[in-house]
Image: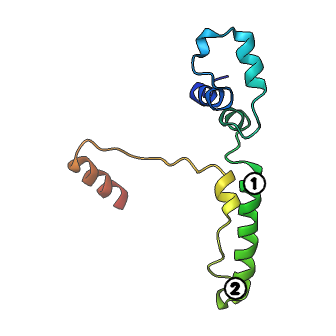
């Protein structure tokens, strides 16, 4: 499993003041690592979390309030411009986008002509 070594180093420095990780035995580093809180950088990376519970709760409150305010608008009557969920933005992964790269403008123009049919 590949994890974020920099995140672990930052967490150990911030929490325990350990700046030279190589000077300690591996068992000691493992013990310190297990003692890190759930909102530490490495724990968030290991559990694939993007933010802590407090941030999620605050985002949920904003979502509910913005939805309630929206329900009182004319847009809500026609189901338009519904507010986007902050919780969804925080916890869902952005879709991977595909990009096409061209060496020069001529290649781009040729591709555009190809797409036009």
The residue under the point 69% across, 8% down is 25
Pick the residue in front: 99 or 31: 31
Assign a secondary structure to mark 2: helix
Q: Which mark is residue 70?
A: none
Mark 2 or 1: in front is 1
Q: Is there CB contact under 8 Å for labels 2 and 1? A: no
Q: Which mark is residue 76?
A: 2
Q: Which residue in the structure is indicated by mark 1?
A: 54
Q: Position of residue 80 (x, y in %)?
A: 64, 82
The residue under the point 28% across, 51% down is 108
Query: Quadrant location of the C terminus?
Result: bottom left
Number of numbered discs present?
A: 2
Query: Quadrant location of the N terminus?
Result: top right
Picture quarter containing residue 89? Answer: bottom right
The answer to whether residue 45 is visible is yes
Q: Position of residue 58 (x, y in %)?
A: 73, 61
Picture quarter containing residue 114? Answer: bottom left
Pick the residue in front: 3 or 9: 9
Q: Is 39 left or right of 102, judged from the image as shown?
A: right
- Dot 1, crowdedness within 10 Å: few (<14), some or many (≥20)? few
Q: Is residue 44 above or below residue 23?
A: below
The residue under the point 34% across, 44% down is 101
Q: Position of residue 81 (x, y in %)?
A: 62, 79
Scheme by which the image is coloured: rainbow
The residue under the point 31% across, 56% down is 112
Pick the residue in front: 50 or 12: 12
């Amino acid at each position: 499993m590949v994890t974020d070594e920099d995140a672990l180093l930052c967490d150990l420095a911030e929490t325990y003041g350990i700046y030279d990780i190589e000077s300690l035995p591996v068992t000691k580093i493992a013990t310190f690592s297990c003692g890190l809180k759930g909102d530490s950088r490495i724990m968030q990376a290991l559990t694939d979390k993007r933010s802590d519970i407090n941030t999620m709760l605050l985002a949920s409150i904003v979502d509910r309030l913005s939805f309630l305010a929206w329900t009182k608008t004319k847009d809500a009557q026609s189901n338009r411009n519904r507010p986007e969920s902050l919780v969804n933005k925080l916890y869902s992964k952005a879709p991977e986008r595909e990009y096409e790269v061209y060496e020069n403008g001529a290649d781009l123009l040729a591709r555009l002509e190809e797409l036009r049919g």
